[in-house]
Image (cartoon, rainbow, N blue to C red):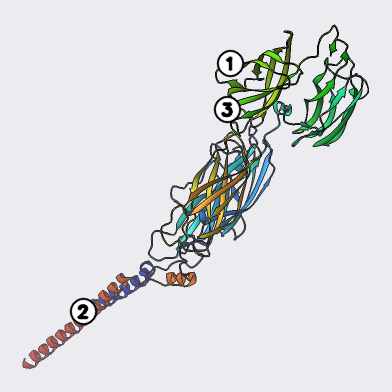
């Protein structure tokens, strides 16, 4: 009997152990929206709002994370307040999760922080390391940076790391495991160079202002003449125009010789002057200079521009233009030029043809032409900057050729070449004259596309992004840069990039919508078209091709049913084995007990029989 009680006690203990171990052998998946292994404290912010940011020198550790797809996350609603170098720049944007894939879904944006690299344009204060925490599928981010002092005016790329969760929609597949992912997103911020003592003294340029004349001015000795022109500037505001009275000023220094035409600041200033021609002027063209004051980049600048006026001098009995029987000065002038190319670039060479005309009524001979520039912008290829002409008849023209090299490092603007003429008339009287021509310089545009990220899981009717970096490898800036993509399998929205300074980069992200499934393995089926204005103001288009695949849309998976399946307890085969062992043990125990009782009864009956026999 005691042994039976022990057996029953063992069976009861084993039953209690089985009940206690039941949660261990039965696994229940977490409910939808609840992370396995976390309690009720997981997540502290709701969808659409940003959690509190934490600051410090520590960066986000990505060693246990997986690099995600760029199309998983999008940045929208970018707002930038401030642009001055050395000042506070406030940046606000929204980080949003995309649902582009049928194989997984985003189940929360966890963290956002700036990526502090070598090209980071802001001071590395606590704000540069601030981490904004979240838990929903959208996260509002706000940063208050301080721009570095030594920045030049340009668009600067700023990167942000986004950490998010991703959950697979396919059971038993490790390729889209339920882990934490990260991706880097870029934005472009325009920053303006800080004004310093060196930059406040804005240098004037010869091409800042030009004089537009409708009629060539003429005058005769001792008579009044009118000079009318319009001072024009494309980017500056003209405030004042004044004649320059120099030693060779051909008018009497009275009246309009001291007249100043002024305005509060305009890009087009009409000027009218009435001068009296001096009686001792020589017949021919003479320059008249004007000092022009204008506002450029907020600073006052001055430039001198000249007009040529045709004057008729007093005729003497023995000749014209001077006393003592001297004849008038024969005018040998440069009337124009041609080049063998439409555009001239720094560091290259070109062929220059000068057109020379003898405006006198008599021939000139023994002519020497000398070319020179202010700072060696143009140099003859053969090293000789002179040319010789034996003679030019009265009223005749002559063409002179030069092969020129262009200095490297020139800007996109006109540069002046001075042409000095030395010649003699038929009486061997020596004369000199100077003319100037302007050669416009253009800059070559060089664009390189890098960091191309094709859209991931672009399906029929679905949307995704094609992103890449535009690198300006040329010497001039690229202004008003825009990007559009063309292809038969998708539609695209135009993306605006802005201005990209020389040597800088701009980030482009083009939204694509699938319209036709890619039947075969297509190559270069997407044409990227980049349109911009170069340093010369010309609109230029750059094209490059890449590959974009549009896949068939996968059937939707009901995530709620999937979660219900996951929440169902999973059968534990070890529990059934243990239960079967216990049942067998109980049966064996019952059989043993019954057999022992039967043996005991037989022994008692035998003892009784023995007593009766006695």
The residue positioned 69% from the left and 17% from the top of the image is 420
Between tags 3 and 2, which lies in front? 3
Task: Please name the predominant secondary structure of the magenta segment in the image.
Answer: loop
Which quarter of the picture shows residue 192? top right
- Res. 350 mark: 3
Task: Looking at this view, name the residue that lies furthest to the top.
Answer: 324
**Residue on which disc 1 sits:** 384
**Residue beneath label 2, please?**
588
- Circle 3 crowding by C-alpha within 10 Å: few under 14, some 14–19, many from 20: many
Q: Residue at x 44, y 47 (%)?
A: 63
Q: Position of residue 248 (x, y in %)?
A: 82, 16
Dot 2 alpha-carbon crowd within 10 angstroms: few under 14, some 14 to 19, many 20 or more: few
Q: Secondary structure beneath disc 1? A: loop
Classify 542 as above or below 318.
below
Q: Secondary structure at mark 3?
A: strand
Q: CA distance from mark 3 to mark 1?
A: 15 Å
Q: Is residue 1 found left or right of 40 in the rendered image?
A: left
């Amino acid at each position: 009997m005691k042994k039976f009680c022990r057996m029953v006690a063992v069976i009861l203990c084993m039953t209690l152990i089985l009940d206690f171990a039941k949660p261990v052998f039965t696994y229940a998946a977490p409910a939808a929206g609840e992370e396995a292994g976390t309690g009720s404290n997981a997540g502290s912010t709701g969808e659409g709002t940003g959690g509190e940011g934490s600051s410090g020198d520590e960066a986000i550790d990505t060693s246990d994370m997986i690099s995600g797809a760029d199309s998983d996350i999008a940045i929208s609603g970018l707002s930038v307040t401030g642009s001055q170098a050395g000042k506070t720049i406030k940046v606000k944007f929204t980080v949003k999760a995309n649902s582009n894939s049928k194989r997984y879904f985003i189940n929360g944006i966890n963290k956002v922080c700036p990526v502090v690299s070598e090209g980071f344009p802001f001071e590395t204060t606590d704000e540069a390391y601030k981490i904004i925490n979240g838990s929903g599928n959208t996260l509002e981010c706000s940063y208050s940076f301080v721009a570095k002092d030594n920045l030049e005016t340009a668009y600067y790329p700023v990167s942000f790391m986004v950490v998010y969760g991703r959950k697979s929609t396919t059971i038993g597949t490790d390729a889209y495991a339920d882990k934490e992912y990260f991706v880097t997103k870029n934005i472009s911020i325009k920053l303006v160079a800080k004004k310093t003592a060196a930059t406040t003294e804005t240098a004037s340029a010869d091409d800042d202002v030009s004089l537009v004349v409708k009629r060539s001015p003429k005058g005769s000795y001792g008579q009044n003449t009118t000079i009318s022109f319009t001072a024009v500037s494309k980017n500056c505001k003209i405030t004042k125009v004044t004649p320059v009275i120099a030693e060779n000023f051909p008018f009497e220094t009275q009246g309009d010789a001291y007249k100043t035409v002024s305005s509060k600041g305009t890009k087009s200033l009409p000027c009218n002057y009435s001068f009296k021609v001096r009686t001792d002027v020589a017949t021919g063209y003479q320059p008249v200079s004007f000092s022009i004051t204008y506002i450029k980049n907020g600073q006052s600048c001055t430039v001198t521009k000249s007009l040529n006026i045709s004057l008729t001098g007093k005729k003497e009995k023995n000749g014209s233009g001077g006393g003592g029987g001297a004849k008038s000065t024969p005018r040998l002038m440069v009337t124009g030029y041609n080049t063998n190319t439409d555009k001239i670039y720094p560091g290259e060479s070109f062929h220059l043809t000068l057109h020379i005309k003898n405006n006198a009524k008599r021939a000139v001979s023994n002519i020497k032409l000398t070319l020179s520039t202010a700072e060696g912008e143009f140099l003859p290829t053969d090293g000789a900057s002179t040319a010789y002409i034996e003679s030019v008849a009265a009223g005749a023209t002559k063409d002179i050729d030069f092969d020129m090299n262009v200095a490297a490092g020139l800007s996109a603007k006109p540069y002046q070449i001075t042409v000095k003429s030395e010649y003699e008339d038929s009486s061997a009287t020596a004369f000199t004259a100077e003319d100037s021509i302007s050669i416009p310089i253009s800059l070559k545009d060089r664009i390189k596309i890098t960091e191309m990220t094709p859209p991931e899981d672009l399906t029929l009717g679905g949307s995704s992004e094609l992103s890449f970096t535009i690198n300006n490898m040329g010497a001039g800036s690229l202004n008003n840069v825009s990007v559009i993509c063309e292809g038969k399998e998708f539609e695209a929205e135009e993306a605006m990039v802005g201005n990209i300074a020389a040597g800088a980069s701009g980030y482009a992200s083009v939204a694509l919508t699938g319209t036709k499934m890619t039947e075969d393995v297509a190559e270069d089926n997407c044409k990227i078209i980049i349109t911009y204005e170069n340093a010369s103001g010309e609109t230029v288009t750059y094209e490059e091709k890449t590959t974009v695949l549009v896949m068939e849309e996968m059937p939707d998976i009901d995530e709620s049913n999937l979660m219900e399946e996951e929440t169902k307890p999973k059968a534990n085969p070890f529990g059934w084995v243990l239960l079967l062992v216990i049942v067998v043990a109980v049966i064996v125990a019952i059989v043993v007990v019954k057999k022992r009782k039967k043996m005991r009864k037989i022994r008692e009956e035998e003892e009784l029989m023995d007593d009766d026999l006695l």
